[in-house]
């Protein structure tokens, strides 16, 4: 039988025709979805106008609470929100660093500040009581859950120290949840008393470490994945109260935590990264398939979108590549530590 007559016989069969029909419909459906999300990605990243912060009460005496505000990404959130006309409550461990930043922001932007110093890894009730009393009576509209800890270097899970494991989970998860429970009632009250003239906003820092299961950063990876589910669940709960809740996904940014000093196209400075967040709240960027989630920095967004639409974040391929990358980072970090010791 020739190929032509084989194909003719196959396509004359009703069963094959039905299968072909289903395949075409599914193909068109998938292609349409992909085209729409690509258009939305491009619009989010390069076309749509920046977020209008007056809806969150900018320049109306409202307050933003920022955790991990004394360094890196958190310091930039504080600076850029002050620049947009919010008073700021700065939270971190080190009182002296917070005092310096508060002074700088007050004189540069003519806003008010408060500082709250505690170690989030201790998870003491006194920490949350101190925060609650510091914001009592303030018209808070924004909470930035930025504080976070990662592993000092990539490490096999079974070799992770007890302190590092507990600190990561306590700071990234327990303290973040407790801080949110402490601050959110003030946001609800501010929105209600404004008769819904202003909205509330809760941003939580996620990570590519949580987007992709990351071998050798297993505890950090799990803690950030936890925040994805928690934050999206909270977004649903707080929507009727006019409070927007978003998880912010980021690949590497230059900071003390990443130990990267030089920026590049894919590794922005905290200033460039936070600018991309604050310009695009409410848009998904690279996180097109996720509710209440944004991957705002353009290079991170393209990476996120690319991975989701090719191998997928939970695939064996992604896991294997990630394992190789973090094994090699660990080897280099151990060699560097050895060289330092020998000097
Ligand atoms: N940098 C990256 O490449 C990257 C990538 C993805 C996601 N992220 C996420 O972005 C967030 C900020 O990271 P970053 O790189 O800006 O970190 P960073 O430069 O190390 O700054 C961390 C901030 O948190 C404070 N902090 C640390 N431990 C604390 C504790 N136990 N209690 C209270 N405050 C504490 C620090 O101030 P004190 O020392 O004064 O306490 C500092 O203000 C984290 O959630 C991180 O997971 C970062």
Image: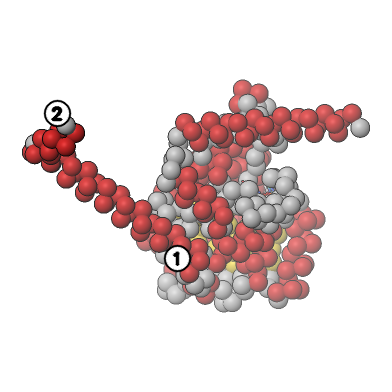
Q: Residues within 10 Å of mark 1 (few under 14, many from 20)?
A: some
The disc at residue 1 is 2
Colour scheme? secondary structure
Q: Is residue 251 left or right of residue 287?
A: right
Residue placed under numbered mark 1 in the picture: 43
In this rendering, the answer to whether 44 lies above or below 322 is: below
State which mark lies toward you, 1 or 2: 2
Between 331 and 84, which is closer to the camera in this rendering?
331
Q: Is the shortest distance between ligand 1 and the CB of mark 1 under 8 Å?
A: no
Between 326 and 230, which is closer to the camera in this rendering?
326
Q: Tell me the quadrant of the picture where the N terminus can be found.
A: top left
Q: Residues under labels 1 and 2: Cα distance?
A: 53 Å
Q: Is residue 190 visible?
A: no
Q: Residues within 10 Å of mark 2 (few under 14, many from 20)?
A: few
Between 270 and 11, which is closer to the camera in this rendering?
11
Residue appearing at x 65%, y 40% in the figure: 150
Residue appearing at x 74%, y 52% in the figure: 262
Residue 251 drawn at (x, y percent): 59, 48
């Amino acid at each position: 039988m020739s190929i032509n007559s084989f194909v003719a016989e196959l396509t004359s069969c009703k069963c094959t025709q039905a299968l072909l029909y289903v395949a075409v419909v599914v193909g068109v459906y998938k292609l349409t979805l992909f085209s729409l999300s690509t258009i939305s990605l491009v619009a989010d990243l390069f076309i749509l106008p920046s977020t209008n912060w007056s809806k969150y009460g900018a320049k109306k005496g409202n307050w933003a609470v920022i955790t991990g505000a004394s360094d890196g990404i958190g310091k930039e959130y504080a600076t850029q929100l002050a620049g947009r006309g919010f008073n700021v409550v700065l939270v971190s461990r080190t009182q002296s660093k917070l005092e310096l930043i508060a002074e700088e922001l007050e004189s540069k932007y003519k806003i008010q500040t408060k500082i709250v110093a505690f170690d989030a890894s201790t998870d003491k009730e006194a920490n949350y009581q101190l925060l609650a009393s510091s914001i009592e009576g303030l018209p808070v509209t924004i909470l930035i859950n930025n504080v976070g800890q990662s592993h000092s270097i990539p490490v096999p899970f079974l070799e992770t120290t007890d302190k590092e494991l507990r600190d990561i989970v306590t700071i990234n998860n327990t303290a973040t949840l407790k801080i949110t429970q402490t601050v959110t009632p003030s946001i609800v009250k501010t929105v209600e008393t404004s008769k819904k003239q202003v909205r509330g906003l809760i941003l939580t820092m996620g990570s590519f470490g949580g987007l992709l299961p990351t071998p050798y950063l297993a505890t950090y990876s799990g803690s950030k994945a936890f925040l994805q589910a928690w934050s999206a669940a909270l977004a649903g709960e707080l929507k009727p109260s006019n409070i927007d809740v978003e998880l912010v996904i980021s690949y590497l940014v230059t900071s003390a935590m990443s130990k990267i000093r030089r920026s590049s196209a894919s590794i922005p400075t905290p200033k460039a990264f936070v600018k991309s967040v604050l310009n695009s709240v409410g848009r998904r960027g690279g996180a097109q398939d996720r509710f209440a989630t944004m991957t705002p920095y353009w290079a991170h967004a393209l990476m996120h979108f690319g991975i989701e639409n090719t191998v997928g974040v939970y695939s064996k391929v992604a896991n294997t590549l990630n394992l190789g990358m973090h094994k090699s980072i660990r080897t280099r970090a151990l060699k560097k530590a050895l060289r330092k010791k020998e000097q």
